[in-house]
Image: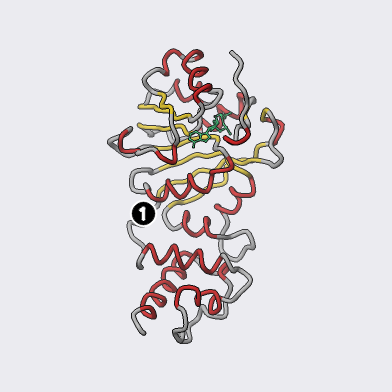
Amino acid sequence: MYVRQKKSLGQHFLHDRQIAERIAKSIDDSTKSLLEIGAGTGVLTEFLLEKNIDFKAIEIDKEFVAFLRNTFPDIKHKLIEGDFLKLNVHDIFDKPFSVIGNLPYNISSQIFFKILDEKNHIPEAVFMIQKEVAERIAEKPGSKTYGILSVLVQAFYNVEYLFTVHENAFTPPPKVKSAVIRLNRNSVQHLNCDEILFKKTVKATFNQRRKTIRNSLKLITGNRMIPENRFLQLRPETLSVSDFAELTNLVENLLKTH
Ligand code: SAM
């Protein structure tokens, strides 16, 4: 069965089965429910179907959905044709579940934001993504690559960079290297600040990362006089998650003034 490859859906297919098996094994042995995002040719799905767990897969491309149904008769009730970004995950699982996937790179950030929205239902994720994005998400403060996703993801997940994957492991090969990362939910239930304002503060400061925090905060605080504090002369890449929470509280107090 021939299926056309669609670049617009981030379709670069892994053909190295050893790597697929290694990715499948990176999910914790105690995992009971698992969702694969973007099953595509089923290279990873084949190993996931062997696990004795509640498994579901979602694929947006109906030609691949037909291909998967043909190739894996067992997948029948486990495969959803649809867009993960629009999926109500609670329609699929009524208990916490892990996620896995060789992600479509063009929407990987949106997928991370959705995982964060559902963080209390998703204890674990194993993703293959662009190497550069994987490094950024796993990076600690003080590095140039530390950015918005590093702070937002690390606020709620412990991140491990597992291994790098060469572009030749894919058909067609992408222009960049890839990497597999694992996210495990940490014990933080709530940050000690308003979480919507936290996200706004992180985004405002990194979107102008060459400016000092004093200057970029003006986007949120307008003309209000920002009182002296230890963050104002710094650049966002030097701040930890708890620093950002403290900064968010300063911003919140300031917003209460006129
Ligand atoms: N799992 C296969 C592999 O490892 O070779 C395919 C990976 S390919 C990088 C990404 C897959 O995600 C493609 O099959 C693509 O059609 C699918 N996809 C793209 N956008 C999607 C979306 N919004 N929801 C679900 N699947 C999507």
Identify the image quadrant of residue 197: bottom left
Residue 33: x percent and y percent?
36, 32
Give the quarter the ligand 1 occupies. top right
In the visual, does 1 lie left or right of 73?
Answer: right
Q: Disc 1 marks which residue?
A: 187
User: Relative to 46, does residue 257 appear above or below in the rendering?
Assistant: below
Q: Nearer the viewer, residue 178 or 196?
A: 196
Q: Nearer the viewer, residue 137 or 225?
A: 225
Instruction: Determine the residue positioned at 33% across, 60% down.
Output: 190
Residue 28: x percent and y percent?
43, 36
Instruction: Determine the residue positioned at 67% across, 28% down.
Output: 171
Colour scheme of the picture: secondary structure
Amino acid, disc 1: Ser
In the visual, does 217 lie left or right of 88?
Answer: right
Report helix, strand or loop for mark 1: loop
User: Relative to 202, does residue 224 appear above or below in the rendering?
Assistant: below
Instruction: Determine the residue positioned at 43% across, 27% down.
Output: 81
